[in-house]
Structure formats: C-alpha cells, structure tokens
Image (cartoon, helix red, strand yellow):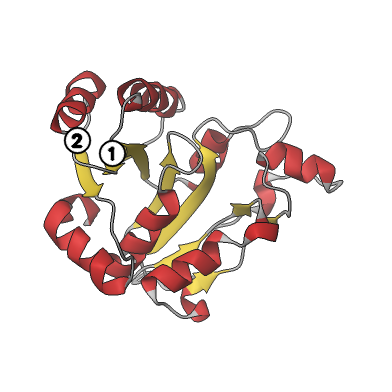
Amino acid sequence: MAERFFVTGTDTGVGKTAVSALLCTALDAIYWKPIQTGSRDGTDRNTVMQLAEMPRSRTVRETYIFSPPVSPHLAARLAGARIELRKIKAPEIPAKEALIAEGAGGALVPINRTQLMTDLMRHLGFPVLLVSRTSLGTINHTLLSLAALRAARLEIRGVILVGKPNLENRKAIEHYGDIGVIGWLPFLKKIDRRMLLCAYRKHFDRKAFES
C-alpha cells in the first residue's frame, strides 16, 4: 500500500499547506483536510489544488468545514455542531494511491470538549509529519510538539522545516528532539508545481517517504 501521512504543525500558519502541496506533487498523492475552519477566507483544499496544479478529482471533500477562522472546537460550537471522530473516516481510495491528510492548527488544537488534534491523528493511524519554522523560537515549539505527539503514542516520521536556512536550529531540533529533519522548504519567490518538485528533489530525504 502507498504511504499515507498526517501533516501537523507547531502552530497555525507555519507552512503545513505548502508542505502538503509539495508532498502531493512529489508523491502524486491525494489531498484531504478532514477539518477546515476559516473557509470564508478560502480553503486549504483550494490552495493545494492551485499550488500543486492538481485537479479537484485528486482531493477529498472535507468532513467538517466551518466559516470562522478559529479553533475547530469553537468553530463547531458557533455553528451549533460537534466534531465527532467516528464521523471522520479515512477516504476509500485504491491501495496504490498515496494520501496526504492535513490537520488544522497545531498538534494540541482542541476539536471538541474532550479531544484534541492528536486524538484525530491516533484515530486515523497515519505516520505524522511535523512542520516547523526555521526561525527564532522554533526549538522550543518543536520540542513541545514532539513531546505531545510522543505522549499520544503516535508514529512520527520526521520534522519538516519551512523558512530561511538555519543550520543551528536544525541541529538542535535533531539533537534535543532525537528526531530526523527529513525536509526543508525554503521561502520561494514563486510557488508552483515545478518549484515544489524542485524543492523536494533538492531538500528532502526521499527514503523517509517510502514504505
């Protein structure tokens, strides 16, 4: 069976969607965002389609989608709804197809009164990719996120950094986090399918994304 990954991050706006677009391009994967908030400003599904230049047929419809750009638990409450894990099921796609599932916000974002994004990750059972910034503060944020993912007994495939090159932060994350940095997405003047594929070939450890 082809690989399926869950992309989470240390924070909102850290670069999960750009990384998801890159992986969809490089792995020829199907994209799925189970929980989308902030849809009034556009969806990550549409962004990935644009960046990766992929058709809607290569994406999966969101299980939950809410208009306000707030945490999933609050967005659902404002809509008079409740996010239920039993209703979020992995897409029925051929075993040969790779899948990239993107989370909402960071690893410990609440999705209802009692469950967090880590519960969704455990529910789906996909290996986790943690997206982190390269900038100041990333060591603390990354180590805290790794601790949360490990406490939830999740399989962490590796860390992917986004931003300007920072070798010292990368080395610190690998050493103190006891984890491999398996990819780096630099800031790109233009983001399109060709540039994403180029970044993958130059800055990612391809073996980390193979079965």
**Left or right: where 132 falls relative to 172:** right
Q: Which residue is mark 2?
A: 180
Q: What type is the residue that disc 1 sits on?
A: Val
Q: Quadrant of residue 160?
A: top left
Q: Is 68 rendered above or below residue 190?
A: above
Q: Is residue 27 toward the left or the right of residue 93 in the image?
A: left
Q: Quadrant of the C terminus?
A: bottom left
The residue beneath circle 1 is 159
Q: Position of residue 15 (x, y in %)?
A: 40, 48
For the residue carrying disc 2, how many other residues have a C-alpha within 10 Å: few (<14), some (14-19), or many (20+)? some
Give the residue at x 26% y 51%: 185
Instruction: Identify the residue at image location x=43%, y=33%.
Output: 10
User: Residue 99 or 185: which is nearer the viewer?
Assistant: 185
Give SS at disc 2: loop
The x and y percentages for residue 98 are 36, 65
Q: Are marks 2 and 1 in contact (CB under 8 Å)?
A: yes
- In the rendered image, which quarter is residue 142 located in? top left
Q: Counting other residues with Cα less than 10 Å from the Cα at mark 1, is it few (<14), some (14-19), or many (20 or more)?
A: many
In which quadrant is the N terminus drawn? Answer: bottom left
Relative to residue 150, is residue 196 drawn left or right? left
Please state which amino acid type lies under the numbered disc 2: Gly
Would you place residue 198 above or below residue 109 in this image?
below
- Residue 148 in picture, x, y percent from top left: 44, 24
Q: Secondary structure at mark 1?
A: strand
Q: CA distance from mark 2 to mark 1?
A: 6 Å
Query: Which is nearer the eye, 18 or 120?
Result: 18
Farthest residue to the front: give it: 189
Q: Is residue 20 visible?
A: yes
Q: Earlier in the sequence, mark 2 or mark 1?
A: 1
